[in-house]
Every structure is written in structure tokens, then in C-alpha cells.
Image (tube, rainbow, N blue to C red):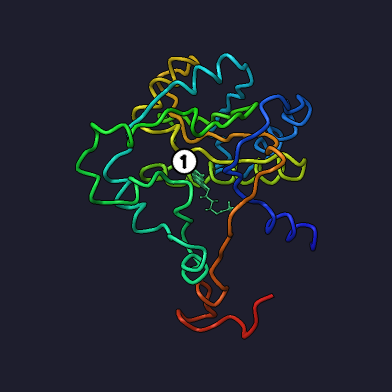
Amino acid sequence: MTDLLDALRSRHSSRVPFDSTRVVASHDLQLILDAARWAPTPHNMQNFEIIAVDDPALIEAIGDISSTVTLEFLRENYEQVSSSDEELARRKVGISARGFPPAWLDPATWEDLPASREFTRTLHESLLGCPVLLVVLYDAERRAPASQGDSLGLMGLGCVLENMWLRAQSLGISVQVLASLAGSEVEPALAKLLGIPDRMRVAFGCRLGYPLADTISGLRVRREIRDFAYRNVYGNPTSQTTP
Ligand SMILES: Cc1cc2nc3c(=O)[nH]c(=O)nc-3n(C[C@H](O)[C@H](O)[C@H](O)COP(=O)(O)O)c2cc1C
């Protein structure tokens, strides 16, 4: 049990450059896909497919795909990021502003959108040398019975993600989720490059690899148990102590 808790706590996002010359062994990739295979899904519908892209030429072509950040993203991101580690530690939710271009954090510049180059990025800036990119797909024409908006199916995709993430991490392979692969500009370009059928939607991507030696990861924060869990009645603490 201690091992499981350690694995859950040490799983983390690697938003750092990976060593593009260090491949992920085919056996390890199969172990990660096997973890996806055993994920729980609603009605056991297994509503996902995964393309593991490890052809360097294809990864290069995916990197050339560009997209412009939306005003919606900028506004909501601005609300949630913290400008310092102290602020992040105090808030206990959200992520650090570090890593976002300065213009994305300055509402005064947003009126230049989309003319300004600041708001257009290529996927090269996200892939950062990854030797393997997993593209996770789901079938938009199927859903769990009576699941409005396929919310249950989407939860299943989250389980697929967590299974793969924990397995990769246990193998010493770092992971970063790339939600931008499902964006309205990126998805069609990706579908064309990878031959994805029309009925399949891109859910998210995962870059896998080994960080370059001299990279650091940022502060990770979480709420206390008392901030989100209650006993019997809303607001009633479950315990006086945090493990
Ligand atoms: C559905 C989902 C989408 C995410 N999208 C991104 C993303 O696009 N880019 C990124 O760097 N992290 C992404 N993340 C990672 C979260 O930001 C991260 O898990 C969270 O900040 C907690 O940090 P940790 O993973 O280091 O514990 C995503 C996570 C989930 C579950």
C-alpha cells in the first residue's frame, strides 16, 4: 500500500524538454498500452484507441502544426495561474504562470489577438524533443447508455490516462498531457497526418520520454483533505489529521 501511495504522490507532469535521442523501448510502450487496456470504462465500452507516434519525421510534421490561443483560454488561464511559488503555495490549486509567454499574462495585449505572433504557437514548443507521442482517440458516435454529452465516456478516458501515467512513471518514463492536440485548429491537421477516421475525435495527447539531465520541475500543490471531503454532512470534517 505504501508503494501505491508513493506512486500516486510521485506521479507528476514533466513540462521540460526530453532527450530526443533516447527512445522509449518497444517493450515499455507495450506495458504502458497494457495499462490503458485495463482501465475501467463505463459499461466496459473501452471507448478509446491510441496512436503511438514514434516516427521522427511524423513527430516533426506534427510539430509544424500551429494554433492561435483563444481569448477564452487566455481569460480563464489568467484567473487560475499564480505568478509566484508563494502565491501557488497559498492557493493550493492551479498552476504556475512560469512557462507561459508574458503576453498571455498581460490582458492589455490581448486586443492584438490574433494578429500578434505572441498568440500563435507551433506544437514544436510543446513536443520539446519527445521521442514518443501518444494520441488518444475516442469514438464520438458511441456513448455509455443514457450518458448525456458522453460524460461517463470522458471519465473513462481519464482512467485510461491515469493508468498509462502511473505505468510510465513506474518504468522511469516521464509524461506530459497535451490537451492542445484536441484544439479546433490542431485536431483536423493531426487527423490528416495520422489518417484518423472522421468518427474518431482526439481526446488528448501524452508526450513520453526522458528529461534532459539539467531540467527541474516546479512546485506541486494540493488542497488538504479537509478542504474537499466531509463526513456524513457537507462541511463536517472526516478527521482532525492529514496522513
Ligand atoms: C485532462 C487533463 C488535461 C491536462 N492538460 C494539460 C496540458 O495541456 N498541458 C500540461 O502541461 N498539463 C496538462 N495536464 C496536467 C495538469 O496540469 C497537472 O496534472 C496538474 O497541474 C497537477 O500537476 P501534476 O501532474 O504535476 O501533479 C492535464 C491533466 C489532465 C488530467
Is ligand 1 less than 8 Å from the beta carbon at label 1? no
Which residue is the extreme one toward the left? 111
List x then y, in percent, for residue 162. 62, 46
Q: Is residue 26 left or right of residue 215?
A: right
List x then y, in percent, for residue 27. 79, 27
What quarter of the picture does the N terminus occupy?
bottom right
Residue 71 position (above or below residue 10): above
Secondary structure beneath dot 1 equals loop
Crowd rating for badge 1 (residues with CA inside 10 Å; few <14, some 14–19, many 20+): many
The image quadrant of residue 206 is: top right
**Which residue does the image show at 52% across and 63% down from the upper left?**
85
| Closer to us: 218 or 243 | 218
| Residue linked to disc 1 | 144
**Which residue does the image show at 39% across and 58% down from the upper left?**
80
Q: How many marks?
A: 1
List x then y, in percent, for residue 136. 54, 31
**Which residue does the image show at 77% across and 40% down from the upper left?**
171
**Which residue does the image show at 48% across and 46% down from the upper left?**
99
| Closer to us: 88 or 194 | 88
What quarter of the picture does the C terminus occupy?
bottom right
Residue 236 position (above or below residue 5): below
| Closer to us: 60 or 207 | 60
What amino acid is at disc 1?
Ala
Q: Is residue 101 left or right of residue 132?
A: left
List x then y, in percent, for residue 164. 66, 40
